[in-house]
Image (cartoon, grey):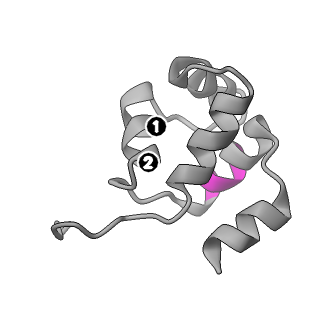
Amino acid sequence: MKKYENIKSNVIGNLIKEYREKRNLEKIDVSRMLQLHAVYLDSTELKRIEDGKQIVKDFELIGLCKVLNINYNDLKNTIE
């Protein structure tokens, strides 16, 4: 995978971090909750996603939305 300087790999990281912090969850907690949905991201990968340094796959995004109760309209507004 090519690396680009100062270019984010995702636009959703800030929203994920916001929802995680609202729920007072640590990254490891989210990681464990995701495993119940067959999504395997460790806390390091979650940090990279939140920092915009890692691409989020569609099934990972669905799992994150489920465990963090991310509102569809907030998600849509972030992407647009």
Q: Position of residue 47 (x, y in %)?
A: 41, 36
Secondary structure state at the residue bearing disc 2:
helix
Q: Any magenta on residue 62?
A: yes
Q: Position of residue 15 (x, y in %)?
A: 62, 52
* Separation of marks 2 and 1 at Cα, in angstroms: 5 Å
Badge 2 is on which residue?
A: 49
Kindly check if marks 2 and 1 are in contact, taking CB atoms under 8 A apart as contact.
Answer: yes
Q: Counting other residues with Cα less than 10 Å from the Cα at mark 1, is it few (<14), some (14-19), or many (20 or more)?
A: many
Quadrant occupied by the N terminus: bottom left
Q: Which residues are magenta?
A: 59-63
Q: Position of residue 60 (x, y in %)?
A: 59, 50
Q: Residue at x 52, y 34 (%)?
A: 40
Q: Residue at x 32, y 54 (%)?
A: 53
- The dot on residue 46 is 1
Q: Is residue 47 left or right of residue 61?
A: left
Above-or-below relation of 14 to 27: below
